[in-house]
Amino acid sequence: MKKTPATCDVENWIYSDTVKDHFFNPRNILLDEKDYVADGIGVVGSPACGDMMALWIRVDKKNNCITECKWRTFGCASAIASTSMLSVMATEGGGMTLARAKKITPEAIIDRLGGLPDRKYHCSVLGHLALREAVQDYESHAE
Ligand code: FES
């Protein structure tokens, strides 16, 4: 039987079915933004691993709700699953208000995913920071 290093906690590498679903079928991914007209854009990088995340939102200006949340990343499977879930959370039920969207936490995303391995926490931070930046970008132009 192949041995693993003693420092590797292999049991914590398991991904939930929800993570796998969002990784293999990512929601709201935007492969080419050339013809996409966004109301706000956020681009962030992860200091932990160097991966990048870009996120675009469209806003219902009357109700201050997010109607579309598109994204693309060079990040890993966990970043893809996390941001896919984030995009669903931001737009479900008619769209989240901008005020609420700015308060989404990585923990809330991970909770909806049914967990993430501990060492993948930083991958879920990318999407929530990019969303926050996209909302701030929209608000800076809307005034
Ligand atoms: S390891 Fe870089 S985003 Fe997950």
Image (spheres, rainbow, N blue to C red):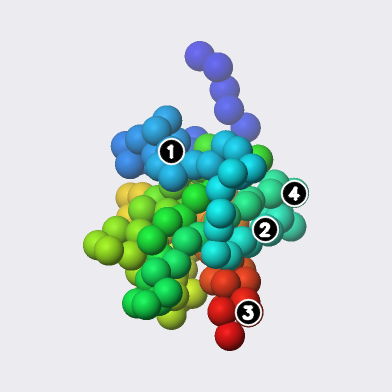
Residue underneath mark 4: 50
Location of residue 18 in the rendering, given as x and y in whole percent from the top left corner: 33, 41
Does the Cβ of the disc 4 residue fall within 8 Å of ligand 1?
A: yes
Local secondary structure at mark 3: helix
Relative to 6, residue 3 above or below: above
- Whether residue 49 sits left or right of residue 35 in the image: it is right
What amino acid is found at the position of numbered circle 4 in the picture?
Answer: Gly
Discs 4/3, front: 3
Q: Which circle's residue, 2 or 1, is located before the other in the chain?
A: 1
Does the Cβ of the disc 2 residue fall within 8 Å of ligand 1?
A: no
Q: Which circle's residue, 3 or 1, is located before the other in the chain?
A: 1
Label 4, label 2: how far apart the Cα atoms are = 13 Å
Label 2, label 1: how far apart the Cα atoms are = 19 Å
Residue underneath mark 3: 140
Location of residue 36 in the rendering, given as x and y in whole percent from the top left corner: 56, 48
Residue underneath mark 2: 43
Discs 3/2, front: 3
Q: Which circle's residue, 1 or 4, is located before the other in the chain?
A: 1
Q: Quadrant of residue 99?
A: bottom left
Most foreground residue, 27 or 12 = 27
